[in-house]
Amino acid sequence: MVKLSPSIFGADFGRLNEQIKAVEDCNVEMLHIDVMDGNYVPNIAFGPDQIAMLRPHTDLFFDVHMMVTEPDRYIERIVKAGAQMITVHAEATTHLHRSLMLIKSFGVKCGVVLNPATPPDVLKYVLDDIDMVLVMTVNPGGGGGAFNPTMIEKVREIKEMIGDRDIDIQVDGGVNADNVKSLVDAGANVIVAGSFAFTGDVAKNLDDLRKAADA
Ligand SMILES: O=C(CO)[C@H](O)[C@H](O)COP(=O)(O)O
Ligand SMILES: [Fe+2]
């Protein structure tokens, strides 16, 4: 069984409450929240204050994807805002292990994000410290990008590295009902979807995505 984590970045912000209720009604396992700092990625989106504003409106598990240069500067504020899982880019922190330990010190789950061009080797010495690996299937920083099929092989490679450890593999970027099965077959079990989830009928989209993933 896969876990779905719709990306709020893809939502219609004029109807945010309604869109959050729609994903809740689909019994999704997480809500994916992108933090973009305008430095690590060109785009700017969501900071700790906006996450804190969302927190009283839903009990969904907050899966926060930090696209932030030197994320340690914001980790405590993001935890206090209500994050339950924080992922940081291996490419964006000078001290990956230190960042992961900082996240864990607050009692929340942690994960490592890899851009499409980043090889999985960087995970080797932190595998016993993480709850999730996030494989970017587009370059980070925006929604609606085209899925990079080369990442299917990368997911497979990471699945093999993980062995019998209890580590989730999340995929993010351009994921839809047509490509999700190839990712799940390769080993992904946490599916992020932004534009696919929120364009049109949210309930139908998430139902289609789950059915395709679990087929
Ligand atoms: O991290 C991200 C982009 O950097 C996102 O989670 C983004 O919301 C994915 O959107 P889409 O499913 O439309 O590609
Ligand atoms: Fe994301």
Image (tube, grey):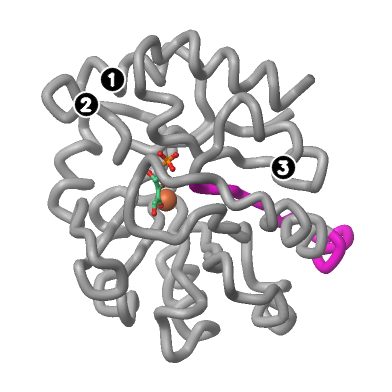
* Amino acid found under the numbered disc labelled 3: Leu
The tag earlier along the polypeptide, 2 or 1, is: 2
Q: Secondary structure at mark 3?
A: helix
- Disc 1 versus disc 3: distance between alpha carbons? 26 Å
Q: Which residues are magenta?
A: 160-173
In magenta segment, residue 186? no
In the rendered view of the protein, which quadrant contains the N terminus? top right
> Which residue is labeled 1 in the image?
19
**Is 203 displayed left or right of 117 in the figure?**
left
Residue 169 appears in the rendering: yes
User: CB under 8 Å between callouts 2 and 1?
Assistant: yes
Whole-Å distance between the Cαs marked 2 and 1?
7 Å
Place of residue 118 in the rendered image (x, y in percent of width and height, measured from the top left): 59, 75
Residue, disc 2: 12
Which residue corresponds to the image point at 32% horizontal and 59% vertical from the top-left? 79
Give the foreground label among 1 and 3. 3
Disc 2 residue type (three-letter): Asp
Q: Nearer the viewer, residue 152 or 86?
A: 152
